[in-house]
Amino acid sequence: MAEKYFVECDCGKRVRVELYEAGTEKACHSCHKSVMVPDTITLQESSGDKYPMMRPIEKIRRTLELGEPPFDGLCHHCEDADATFAVPITLSVLIERHMDHDGGIRPTLNGGVKLVAAAAEEFWQETAFPLLLCQKCHSEFQSAQAAASMKRKLGLVGLVGLLIAFLVFAYFNAELVALFAGIFWLIGAFAWAARFRDTKKIEPYIVAWLNDIRWVPETLALEDEYHLTVESSKKF
Ligand SMILES: [Zn+2]
Ligand SMILES: [Zn+2]
């Protein structure tokens, strides 16, 4: 992700500037007064991290609590206008997992064996933060959300179609069915098993939007196991 530069306007808002705009004047998106963009070195220094020693997720918590950038009200997507919508995001990160026992095959009293599931105690940490969007970016977000839900529905329709095709096929070619059933069962079993390896539960469309928030991409890259919930957006 390209580094972003901001100057603070007299009205208290951050104004996004580019490195090549150093030494020029730029109009504030909020009060429309012009702000002076300093030289490139000052710009680069000012983009520095206030909390270099913290874990990215702690930086999110701290800046949100203090209302500091990136949670100072600027749209996360275009960073060129004040946000008017907030999409509540909850990120649950696995902090610790204690294994009580590993599970496996155990002998029983009557000389048989039984399979024991592994038992674990888990500690999850929830961090709630908003995805802030201006009017224009919010409509873009809503269409992305609608497209993602359409894609999910089409996927389901496709699966049902495949099942119907298979049933029709089975009706006319009974002798091949046993073979196909075996293959389908194997594929299904692998897909089922794969679910348990999927430790980062996140919908693909939301990733691009969350990448706009400073430290969120770093958090998602750093944590091993997490899941994420997205609630419907609120106007403020
Ligand atoms: Zn201003
Ligand atoms: Zn925007």
Image (cartoon, rainbow, N blue to C red):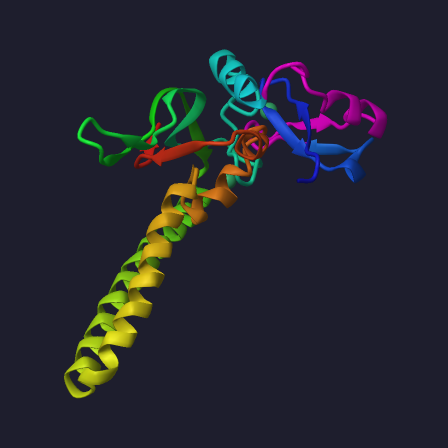
Write down the quadrant of residue 88 in the picture. top left
Q: Is 34 in front, or is 191?
A: 191
Along the horizontal axis of the image, is 91 left or right of 53? left
| Quarter location, residue 228 | top left
Farthest top residue?
66
Which residue is more in the foreground, 114 or 158? Answer: 114
Is residue 42 on the magenta stretch? yes
Extreme residue toward the left, this view: 171
Q: Is residue 70 magenta?
A: no
Asked if residue 61 is positioned above or below residue 111 in the image, the reply reads: above
The residue range painted magenta reads 27-55
Instruction: Say which quarter of the image contains residue 37.
Output: top right
Quarter that holds the C terminus: top left
Percent across and percent down for residue 122 are 37, 21
Name the quarter where the N terminus is drawn. Answer: top right
Q: Position of residue 145 (x, y in %)?
A: 36, 49
Residue at the far front in the pictured view: 111
Which residue is pictured at 18% across the width and 76% down the height?
167
Identify the main secondary structure in magenta: loop
16 to the left or right of 31: right
Name the spot of residue 183 as percent of width and height, x first: 33, 69
Residue 179: image location, x then y, percent: 29, 75
Above or below: residue 70 compared with residue 150 = above
Q: Residue at x 23, y 78 (%)?
A: 177
